[in-house]
Image: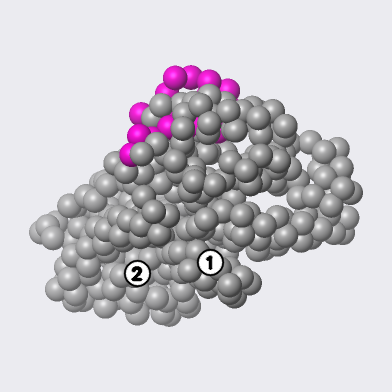
Amino acid sequence: MKILVVLCQNPFTHFDGGTYAVRASLRQLEHKGELIVTGFGADFDNPRIGNYKSAGSLGEVHNSRFEFIKALVLGHSYSMEKYAGRLAQSKLQKILLENRIQVAWFDKLQSVAAALGSAKFESTHSGRLYVLRSHNVEHAILSDRLSTDSWLTKRLLKLEASRLRREEIAAIVATDYTCTISREDRESLVAELPELKERIIFLPLSAESVTDCGNNGDAPRKSVLFIGDCRWRPNRIAAEWIAEELAPTLYKACPDLAIRLVGRGTEMFSRMQANLEGVGFAERLDEEFEAALCTIAPVWHGGGVNVKVIESLAHGVPVIGSVFAKRGTDTEAYIEAETAADFVARISELKDRPNLNTNLSISARCSVTKSRKEFDDIWTQILGKAGY
């Protein structure tokens, strides 16, 4: 079986939450058939992208204010329009036909734009399986980011969100299956398209690897760990909340525990409190996980799945976090907390009950292994219904 994965960008030159999810798709699909990739950017003209054979680039994507306004005037979503040029359409059709592709996997909503924009889409769809790997309910995420003070900008972005909603629904209707990254996203899409309930599937995200460095050793665990790039607003808000509210509250209850903030921009928070350490960017996180009693995820905004949660579970380290940050995970090792008092109570319990921590560590790694099995089961189900 030949599987074409269509990408928006090279996932091996960026290392954020979105590209983490793309790499997870590639890892999970590479054992299911002959895997070929294509996407936007000159990188795809190289013979390989990472370890994967490239079928060539679909062209370049550039942001343009003029094209943004033009798309809105014409009633289109610019988020989709910029990926749907005629050159991209013709190149994609050529790749599909010349490589005799049986499954086209579109990773992220915008990657499907070139296929949907082609007049040949319907005629070439027959006999080929089209799967959309949705990273978010994109129009909802766009609406959530209207933090600008400019009335005009806000108005234009709201208009773009409404256009994107229409085109996102059209993409879900046109493809055979949509695989969401969280149960919450699936519920949202099913509420909008109840007739497509069987074609909208929650597909969990898998970790890069499962590491046996959880809470099984004898070394004392003296840190509470937060990982996040503070150039991204939801992480910066979380780090500010930790510095201003959580750190002083935790110091009163557990003065021997340090909170370590790791990631770009976290160094600005160093020593704002006696128990707070802003480490900055770290190339490797294994030592941080090995020393951590738990990780914390006080995140209430954003989209996708929190990579720091997935990685913590893969390392066997339990997570204490908001209900929002739990998106895409299903494990006893994720302990919910919303207020500073909640976080301190949960952290204190882990510190005072080593056996609980050990059990949660085992549960964390098991949840990651379970997500991989779920992918295999769902993949078999999709192919079976398609007659493969």
Q: Residue 152, percent across and down?
A: 88, 55
What is the three-letter code of the residue carrying label 2? Answer: Asp
**Residues at discs 2 and 1 in contact (Cβ within 8 Å):** no
Residue denoted by label 1? 185
Residue at 25 percent across and 54 percent down: it is 315
Q: Quadrant of the N terminus?
A: top left
Q: Secondary structure at mark 1?
A: helix
- For residue 74, side relative to residue 47 (left or right): right
Name the residue nearer the viewer: 321 or 93: 93
- Tell whether position 44 is magenta: yes
Image quarter of residue 371? bottom left
Mark 2 or mark 1: which comes first in sequence?
A: 1
Can you tell which quarter of the image residue 113 is in? top right
Relative to the observer, which residue lies in front, 315 or 298?
315
User: Residue drawn at (75%, 46%), measured in percent from left and top?
Assistant: 78
Q: Which residues are magenta?
A: 33-51
Is residue 131 or residue 127 the one in the foreground? 127
Q: Is residue 270 visible?
A: no
Q: Where does residue 150 sit, x and y in percent of width and height?
A: 84, 56
Residue drawn at x 56%, y 68% is 196
Q: Nearer the viewer, mark 2 or mark 1?
A: 1
Q: Classify residue 240 by image quadrant.
A: bottom right
Residue placed under numbered mark 2 in the picture: 330
Horizontal side, residue 163 vs residue 129: left or right: right
Q: Is residue 352 visible?
A: yes
Q: Compared with residue 140, is residue 86 higher up or lower down, i.e. above or below? A: above
